[in-house]
Image (cartoon, rainbow, N blue to C red):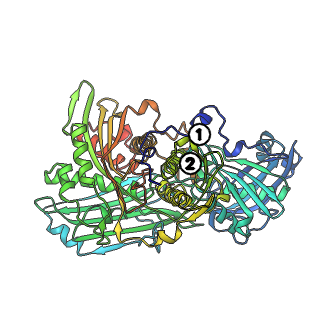
Amino acid sequence: MSVAPTRVVGTPADRLEGRDKVQGEATYAYEYEVEHVAYATPVVSTIAKGRIRSIDSSAALAADGVIAVLTWENAPKLPKAEGELAILQSPQVSYRGQIVGAVVAESYEAARHAELLVRFEYDVEEHDVELRADHPTLYKPGKVNPEFPTDTEEGDVERALEEAAHAIDETYTTPTEHNNAMEPHATIAIWDGPSLTLYDSNQGAHAHRETFAKTFDMPPEQVRVIARHVGGGFGSKGTPRPHAVLAALAARHVERPVKLAVTRQQMFTLTGYRTPTIQRLRLGCDERGMLTAIAHDVVEQTSTVDEFAEQTAVVTRMLYASPNRRTTHRLARLDVPTPSWMRAPGECPGMYALESAMDELAIAAGIDPIELRIRNDPEIDPESGNRFSTRNLVACLREGADRFGWKPGSRRNGRTLAGLGVAASTYPARRRPSQAHARRNGDGTFTMRVGAVDIGTGARTVLAQIAADELAVELDRIHIEIGDSAFGSAPVAGGSAGASSWGTAVVRACRLLRAGDEDEVHVDTSDSADAEEPLAKHGFGAIFVEAHVDVDTAEVRVARALGVFGVGRILNPKTARSQLIGGMTMGIGMALMEETRVDGRLGAFVDQDLAMYHVPVNADVLDVDATWIDEDDPHINPMGAKGIGEIGIVGTAAAVANAVHDATGVRVRDLPITPDKLVGRI
Ligand code: MOS
């Protein structure tokens, strides 16, 4: 049998679940109808640090419809639970908004009402929630997320900086930022004897199953996690969150299924966030603009209950070469929730600083910023010494300059100052082990099952496209089922590795099905995922921005933005473009709006809703476009594709900041670029 030519991959197929979603028929975690269900709501701490002295649940228990009040005094014990998941296990309070109890009631409204009636008294201790570059608790973590060395050093940076023809030494800061997915985190927990089923809004059914099994000290086979439709995650649903543990604890306690959704306000304390960063960048170059020194020193925070060390400077190790290089990460332990994954953790804040600094160096050296990047594009990965599988940053810069009309220099039109900015973008191209299941049905259709989760990316559609090509059938012959830990192990929808990892398993399963007589096959790619060639594998891109700044109000508008990417083969141009411009839109938010302010006295995040925490809305997003160059990288997966989930955000904030500088001559080094930082300076 000859293999049909590729037809379906690479076409702009509509999302398979699109109609269900717009018709309200796609069922999200909280919406499953479950018999005899009870409703739980978290009770959260009103202090940032201390111990619970006493609890009075009597008024809450007497309220209509209340079934139980859970606190550390009566909650089931979880000796194996770790970090933030060890809720209701002790009277210790480690951050404001920590779960200290739950009300379980016959209705959501009854639970919300009774929540206000539970009385806690605390022995309050002094808290500290404010990150400073000289914080007394700063320490060097053993590694940075997920497994990178904390520091690196090569050559003599100090001396190279002294001898450099041009050098810059600047500090850039990014604030606390929150993911704010549209669908709040939600869980339904159902115990059936020793078995636990969770309908949960998350990015990885299998990974959640493993963590829940550990937390509740039970065999993984007894836990099933279902996440068929998820309304965004951006990292915040990549790791199990404390509210889901609470739902399962409550369900066990009242011996009924329990539904629990966090409120928008609680999403600011219970679902992770991006650490603020303080980044010192020192760059030096010779007369020709060749880098002679690169130093990136990062200060950021973690909590007292867990360690999360954002890998902010790691990207600086591979983007440009220099004989003298240094990267460091230091953490302060504060009385805050633990930071976690958010939209390209590491690369995103790190590249804001590095690519701003490159712009500053280009100006200092009198070299066009695109030319400076082209001159410093390394042949091999400076960190590992390995060849790149494919690296087309230069092509992206050139193509983008051409398409965008690269001609920097401030122009004034009435009250508006206009300028252009550029920045590089990059993100690792990964593949992780995954399983997949393929079945030939009697009617000419095929059923594919993968433990993947589609968090809005189009993963379900793309996996079906891959299967259609491998089986040489039309897309409508493929039934694709995802979002269930019962479908076998599969990696989380994160690290821009979903399509790469699950897709590889789908390819293998389909090939096995075609090659043999069996009507049903199951594959596991874990064997081959280990045997990787020593290549540096990354996607690359170039982001171009035209910023308009009002000379009176100092309001910044991104009038135009273009991303040009070299990210391997594009599996579906419609969903790909959507992901890329989505990432760029988040980058505009990071540059201009997003910030969670911290109140040092109360030990609290002040911003707790979308009225205060601004993300870009339609009116903020004018002309944003993404395109890509022809690339096919055979070294990552059989599809030739690289991940595209995160590369859109990575360079965008720097491109905006660089454009604002080009327009106004003002360099804002502390995100977000709000009018107060420009007014009076332009
Ligand atoms: Mo993404 S922050 O890797 O879920």
Q: Which residue is drawn at 14% across and 68% down?
A: 163
* Residue denoted by label 2: 454
Circle 2: is it few (<14), some (14-19), or many (20+) Cα within 10 Å? many
Circle 1: is it few (<14), some (14-19), or many (20+) Cα within 10 Å? some
Does the image show residue 420? yes
Q: Residue at x 21, y 71 (%)?
A: 323
Q: Residue at x 53, y 42 (%)?
A: 475
Q: Where is residue 630 in the image (x, y as percent from the top left)?
A: 30, 48
**Three-letter code, disc 2:** Asp
Q: Is residue 498 left or right of residue 314?
A: right
Q: In which quarter of the image is residue 418?
A: top left
Q: In which quarter of the image is residue 211?
A: bottom right
Which residue appears farthest toward the left when viewing the image? 287
Question: Along the line of sight, which residue is nearer the eye, 100 or 368?
Answer: 368
Q: Is mark 2 on a helix, strand or loop?
A: loop
Select label 2 or label 1 by which is in front: 1
Contact flag, marks 2 and 1 (Cβ < 8 Å)? yes
Q: How many labels does the image show?
A: 2
* Residue denoted by label 1: 17
